[in-house]
Image (tube, grey):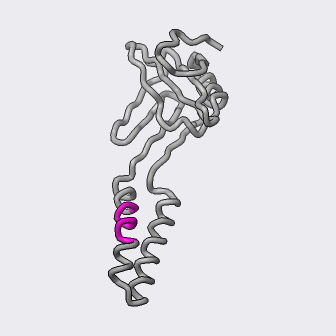
Amino acid sequence: MVSDVFEYRRQERGPKNYIALGVAVAVLYFGWVQGWPLVAVLLSGPFLGFVLARLVMNEAEGFRLTETTLEYYHLTDQQSLDWHEINGVTIAGDSLGGATCLIHCSDGRMERLPATAQFSPERLTQEFRLRGVPVWRTQSLNQSLGDPQLQ
């Protein structure tokens, strides 16, 4: 077993949205200073509202592999599984070089692990195997394919 924590999260409160907020406020300010308040509001107002709404709602997704548990969250749904509650993991590559991951729980349910597209299937396979979880690799997570092959 590995005691290191492996974690990834993606959220709306990131550099891109804060830069967009700064640009929208700057356009609004310079338009106001130049004497075009209505044009400035009409040009940057909707964009500013959109960016502020994304920052306030802060949609987030991610996962954390710890020594004893797998924790994952998507939007408002947060789950935690002990390693002994997991029968195995199916990992497939997506068409963009990332991975998709399906967790097989001991109670028979299957959960899709969020925010795995940033990692290659090999990297996720390595992290799960280091924690003693059986990993199956497949080309697609389509349910009609049947049982994946153990690698």
- Residue 82 in percent (x, y) is at 45, 24
Residue 117 left/right relative to 22:
right
Number of numbered labels in the structure image: 0
Residue 50 located within the stretch drawn in magenta: yes
Magenta part mainly helix, strand or loop?
Answer: helix
- Residue 83 in percent (x, y) is at 49, 22
- Residue 95 in percent (x, y) is at 60, 32
Q: Residue at x 56, y 21 (%)?
A: 140
- Residue 146 in percent (x, y) is at 51, 9
Q: Is residue 40 above or below residue 2?
A: below
**Quarter of the image containing the N terminus?**
top right
Residue 47 located within the stretch drawn in magenta: yes
Q: Is residue 33 above or below residue 27?
A: below
Q: Which range is magenta?
A: 44-51
Q: Nearer the viewer, residue 130 or 149?
A: 149
Q: Nearer the viewer, residue 53 or 113?
A: 53
**Quarter of the image containing the C terminus?**
top right
Q: Is residue 143 above or below residue 114?
A: above
Q: Quadrant of residue 28?
A: bottom left
Q: Nearer the viewer, residue 104 or 84?
A: 104
Q: Residue at x 33, y 41 (%)?
A: 76
